[in-house]
Image (tube, rainbow, N blue to C red):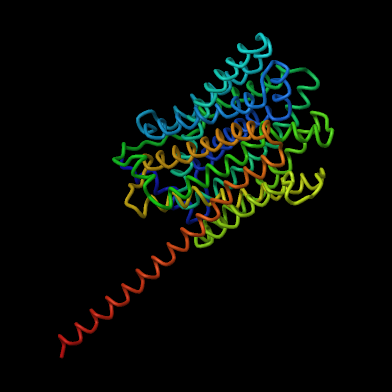
């Protein structure tokens, strides 16, 4: 079957503003993955750092435990994105979801292991396996979603971020409440079981998309200048979010004397603002592609400023207040959406402008690279954050973390200025050539 055969129905349906059966099922499957994976990922934040400290882990080790997930997710996303056509997108999606549910349950049994080295090693092993499973599912999900919505990928991804945000919103308070009520094991066993229930649902409803292997490679894709910029931005945004995992709960409990159950509620600010704003930002990104660069630029600057104010940084001489902390988190969620939502469609358009084939193979490369760069940032953020938080303090560590999106802001300004100059120069050259051809044509007639 030709690759374009399974693209045309979606394009026609998009133009008619009606979703096909495959598109509806694809959205349901992707939503189930986003929700279940994010709720399992986010339950660690409110109580795991304190629990790990009781078992003999330092701040740096805790940061590495969070960060190792991203490291293995980075490696698996690159490999699986390259071979998604050979493995099969649906099989990769479902198998990853099943493995993720199993290891989430196993993570809940780690408190039975002896304190010290054995506990720490088992944390690394289970988190690493979970990372490979998650990398498989999310890479397949991005590819399937882009295949089903070729003209409205940002809108579809923005709408699905509601479910990602919902998972991030519910994970910390549910995890904190279950931990306080039943202990360490129950949050992981309960939520891991929810993930396993998603497996038969996706086996039944997720469409099967077939395609042929492509000739392009990750290296060819990464060499595209705009893709390089997007990769750095993805890593910077992900590092900013990952930084909060091992550091924020400790800062909130020590500074504002909050109980673990209430710490989970503090996480709501960022997740809610991000998930609520994402659908609108995705719609704007699809309907007004020329605005993507401005969303991207403003979002990076806003994210950087939010991290400088999160402590706030000691250079501002502003006292830490709970209301200010929550307000900055809410604003940060919106800014991350501003810069994060346009990234995938920008990468996709850059690939097609540089001669990449339209099909699942290219979508697999972009999805794998997107997931890999997100994972690279998610490794850097917790690892560096845990180290800086231990050596300095949260206020200085957050300010240091804000330097990454600030660099992304500067690079994006430089790139888009250069791109505008390049297009203007090309347009002027075409006008001159057109004028010369018209004159030659008139001279030939006379």
Say above or below: 364 vs 122: below
Q: Is residue 45 left or right of residue 256?
A: left
Q: Answer left or right for 2 relative to 168.
A: left
Left or right of 381? Residue 203 is: left
**Location of residue 117 with respect to 222 vertically, above or below:** above
The residue sitting at the bottom extreme is 446
Q: How many marks?
A: 0
The C terminus lies in quadrant:
bottom left
In front of the other: 28 or 154: 154
Q: Position of residue 331 (x, y in %)?
A: 70, 50
Image location (x, y in percent) of residue 128: 53, 22
Q: Nearer the viewer, residue 408 or 100?
A: 408
Q: Position of residue 43 (x, y in %)?
A: 68, 28
62 left or right, relative to 155: right
Quadrant into which the N terminus falls: top left
Q: Position of residue 45 (x, y in %)?
A: 69, 30
Q: Given the current orientation, which residue lies at the most extreme right position?
A: 257
Residue at point 62% right, 39% down? 241
């Amino acid at each position: 079957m030709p690759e374009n055969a399974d693209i045309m129905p979606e394009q026609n349906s998009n133009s008619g503003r009606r979703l096909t059966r495959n598109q509806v099922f694809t959205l349901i499957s992707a939503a189930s993955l986003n929700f279940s994976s994010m709720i399992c990922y986010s339950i660690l934040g409110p109580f795991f750092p304190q629990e790990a400290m009781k078992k003999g882990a330092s701040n740096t080790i805790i940061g590495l435990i969070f960060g190792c997930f991203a490291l293995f997710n980075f490696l698996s996303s690159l490999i699986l994105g390259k071979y998604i056509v050979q493995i099969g997108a649906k099989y990769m999606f479902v198998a990853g979801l099943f493995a993720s549910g199993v290891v989430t349950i196993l993570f809940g049994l780690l408190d039975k292991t002896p304190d010290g080295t054995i506990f720490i090693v088992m944390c690394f092993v289970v988190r690493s396996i979970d990372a490979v499973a998650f990398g498989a599912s999310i890479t397949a999900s991005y590819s399937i979603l882009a295949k089903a919505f070729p003209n409205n990928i940002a809108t579809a991804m923005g709408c699905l971020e509601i479910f990602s945000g919902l998972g991030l919103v519910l994970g910390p308070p549910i995890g904190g409440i279950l931990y306080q009520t039943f202990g360490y094991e129950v949050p992981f066993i309960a939520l891991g079981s929810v993930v396993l229930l998603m497996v038969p649902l996706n086996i039944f409803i997720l469409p099967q998309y077939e395609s042929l292997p492509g000739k392009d490679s990750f290296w060819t894709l990464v060499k595209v200048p705009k893709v390089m910029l997007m990769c750095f931005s993805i890593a910077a945004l992900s590092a900013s979010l990952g930084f909060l995992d091992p550091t924020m709960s400790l800062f909130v409990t020590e500074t504002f004397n909050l109980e673990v159950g209430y710490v989970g509620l503090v996480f709501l600010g960022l997740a809610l603002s991000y998930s609520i704003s994402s659908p609108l930002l995705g719609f704007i990104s699809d309907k007004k592609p020329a605005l993507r660069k401005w969303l991207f630029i403003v979002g990076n600057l806003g994210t950087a400023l939010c991290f400088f104010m999160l402590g706030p940084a000691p250079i501002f001489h502003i006292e830490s207040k709970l209301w200010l902390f929550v307000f900055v988190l809410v604003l940060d969620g919106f800014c991350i959406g501003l810069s994060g939502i346009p990234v995938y469609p920008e990468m996709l358009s850059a690939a097609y402008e540089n001669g990449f084939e339209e099909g699942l193979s290219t979508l697999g490369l972009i999805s794998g690279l997107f997931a890999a760069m997100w994972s690279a940032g998610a490794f850097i953020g917790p690892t560096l954050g845990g180290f800086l938080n231990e050596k300095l303090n949260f206020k200085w560590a957050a300010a240091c973390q804000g330097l990454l999106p600030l660099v992304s802001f500067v690079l994006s300004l430089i790139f888009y200025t250069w791109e505008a100059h390049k297009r203007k120069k090309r347009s002027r050259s075409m006008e001159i050539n057109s004028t010369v051809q018209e004159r030659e044509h008139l001279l030939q007639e006379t």
